């Protein structure tokens, strides 16, 4: 396990170094961060339908605390996103979880390819699809779990960039136990609004079918994204569960840096 984690961090550091080496070869638009571009968990679950720019490289970090009944859980997730082609990005995520009962380990490493079909028009939203998978990293993981998402974004007001977002997701849980679901679904409805030139408000409603059979999570989330400088965006958000089966609350802090 230690050698695997070391290899992952070497990949992350090498990708960051590559990004610094390419800064002089890209335009300013390719290396500038965009606080309007919504990313999963930065600071809420909703994403928009747009990738990072072509040849853009972005390093992200998510720190999340969740309270569920009598259990506490902390998630630390470093990520790298790269615009491999026009309208296309790839993402590598390496999550680490810490919680009650001695559950402290690296979770499934996530790899995702994201493709945007179109820029929105007056009547048609922007659409995108992402295909990803979680690769097992420890003895408690079993099988590669693929995920497919459909994303849509539509602007409804130009003055403050009011936008509506919809995310639909499906995950196949190949390593499902007897008391777990094999098919996991999620649906997110989100709203974002620019408060000023550097700050954006984000809110969403999340429905997720959990691994445990007959367990569903309903969450309301609210967050702020603030562009500190042209390359850096800071985000903070909080969410509350709406049912007894949902987490009590969730607090998320994130940072993203374009290289």
Image: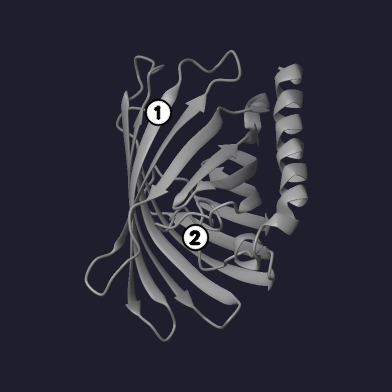
Q: Is residue 95 visible?
A: yes
Which mark identifies residue 161?
A: none
Residue at the farthest left position: 123
x 49%, y 60%: residue: 38
Q: Is residue 209 visible?
A: no
Residue 137 in the figure: left or right of residue 124: right
Residue 148 is situated, as x and y percent measured from the top left of the image, at: 35, 37
x 63%, y 44%: residue: 80
Viewer-nearest residue: 177 or 9? 9
Answer with mark 1 or mark 2, whichever residue precedes in sequence: 2
Q: Residues within 10 Å of mark 1 (few under 14, many from 20)?
A: some
> Where 87 falls versus 94 (above or below)?
below
Residue 207 in the figure: left or right of residue 24: left
Residue 193 is situated, as x and y percent measured from the top left of the image, at: 45, 75
Mark 1–mark 2 contact, CB under 8 Å?
Answer: no
Residue at the farthest front position: 25
> Where 46 falls versus 246 (above or below)?
below
Residue that numbered label 2 is attached to: 38
* Image-quadrant location for residue 18: top right
Residue that numbered label 1 is attached to: 146
x 61%, y 39%: residue: 73
């Amino acid at each position: 396990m230690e050698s695997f984690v070391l290899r992952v961090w070497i990949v992350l550091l090498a990708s960051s170094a590559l990004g610094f080496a390419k800064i002089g070869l890209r335009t300013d638009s390719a290396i500038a961060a965009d606080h309007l571009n919504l990313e999963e968990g930065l600071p809420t679950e909703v994403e928009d339908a747009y990738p990072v720019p072509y040849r853009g490289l972005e390093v992200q970090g998510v720190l999340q605390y969740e309270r569920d009944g009598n259990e506490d859980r902390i998630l630390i997730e470093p990520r790298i996103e790269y615009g491999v082609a026009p309208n296309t990005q790839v993402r590598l995520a390496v999550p680490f979880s810490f919680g009650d009962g001695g559950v402290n380990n690296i979770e499934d490493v996530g790899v995702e390819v994201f493709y945007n079909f179109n820029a929105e028009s007056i009547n048609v939203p922007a659409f995108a699809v992402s295909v990803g998978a979680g690769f097992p990293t420890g003895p408690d993981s079993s099988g590669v779990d693929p995920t497919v998402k459909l994303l849509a974004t539509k602007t409804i007001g130009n003055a403050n960039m009011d936008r509506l977002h919809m995310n639909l997701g499906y995950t196949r849980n190949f390593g499902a136990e007897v008391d777990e679901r094999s098919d996991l679904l999620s649906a997110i409805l989100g709203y974002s609004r620019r408060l000023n030139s550097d700050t954006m408000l984000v809110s969403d409603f999340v429905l997720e079918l959990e691994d445990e059979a007959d367990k569903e999570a309903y969450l309301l989330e609210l967050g702020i994204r603030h562009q500190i400088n042209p390359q850096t965006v800071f985000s903070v958000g909080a969410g509350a569960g709406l049912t007894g089966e949902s987490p009590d609350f969730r607090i998320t802090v994130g940072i993203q840096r374009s290289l």
